[in-house]
Amino acid sequence: MSYSQKLSIINLCISLCSKYGIKTIKGHKELTSTDCPGTYYPLNEIKTSVLNKISTTTYTIKPGDTLFAISKKFNTTVSSLKLKNNLKSNIIYPNEILKIQ
């Protein structure tokens, strides 16, 4: 498996885990006894990369913070922050805790 293929799988898994709140990853060999001869699939490496990235980070809002500024600080989007925190508007208050990832 090439590096770019592995990176694509990792990014897809991160996206799906974040969107659907998935906390565990299993390969088909962990679910069934089906074997795939001749196929190298670095599942443990992929799992480690994904689970390290999806661990939840939180941020306590400070006076003067905006969702836009927080999104830039954590390299995410306002839409993603709103979705992860069930926010209907861009209004936030000091001392609230936001889930970042």
Image (cartoon, rainbow, N blue to C red):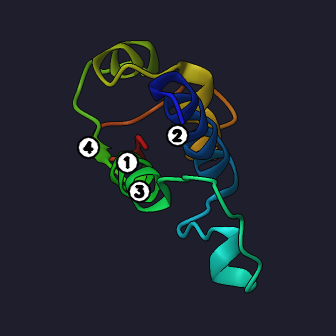
Query: Disc 1 to disc 3, how far (Cα)?
Result: 6 Å
Mark 4 to mark 1 CA distance (whole Å): 26 Å
Mark 2 residue crowding within 10 angstroms, few (<14) / some (14–19) / many (20+): many
Query: Which is in the foreground here, disc 4 or disc 1?
Result: 1
- Is residue 82 placed above or below 97 in the rendered structure? above
In the figure, 56 relative to 8: above or below?
A: below
Query: What amino acid does circle 4 point to?
Result: Thr
User: Marks 2/4: CA distance?
Assistant: 28 Å
* Residue 9, quarter of picture: top right
In front: mark 4 or mark 3? 3
Q: Residues within 10 Å of mark 3 (few under 14, many from 20)?
A: some
Question: How crowded is the residue under tag 1: few (<14 C-alpha within 10 Å), some, or many (20+)?
Answer: some
Distance of label 2 from label 3 (alpha carbons):
10 Å
> For this view, does 70 lie left or right of residue 54?
left
Outermost residue toward the front?
Answer: 38
Q: Is residue 50 left or right of residue 95?
A: right
Question: Which residue position holds label 1?
Answer: 49
Indicate the amino acid at tag 2.
Ile
Task: State which tag comes first along the sequence, 2 or 3.
Answer: 2
Q: Which mark is residue 10?
A: 2
Residue 101 location in percent, x, y?
43, 44
> In the depicted view, which residue is nearer to us: 8 or 50?
8
Residue identifier under label 4: 60
At 51% from the left and 35% from the top, the residue drawn is: 6
Q: Amino acid at mark 3?
A: Leu
Q: Residue at x 40, y 44 (%)?
A: 98
Q: Quadrant of the N terminus?
A: top right
Q: Position of residue 71 (x, y in %)?
A: 41, 20
Q: Do the residues under discs 1 and 3 have CB atoms within 8 angstroms? A: yes
First reached walking from the N terminus: tag 4 or tag 1: 1
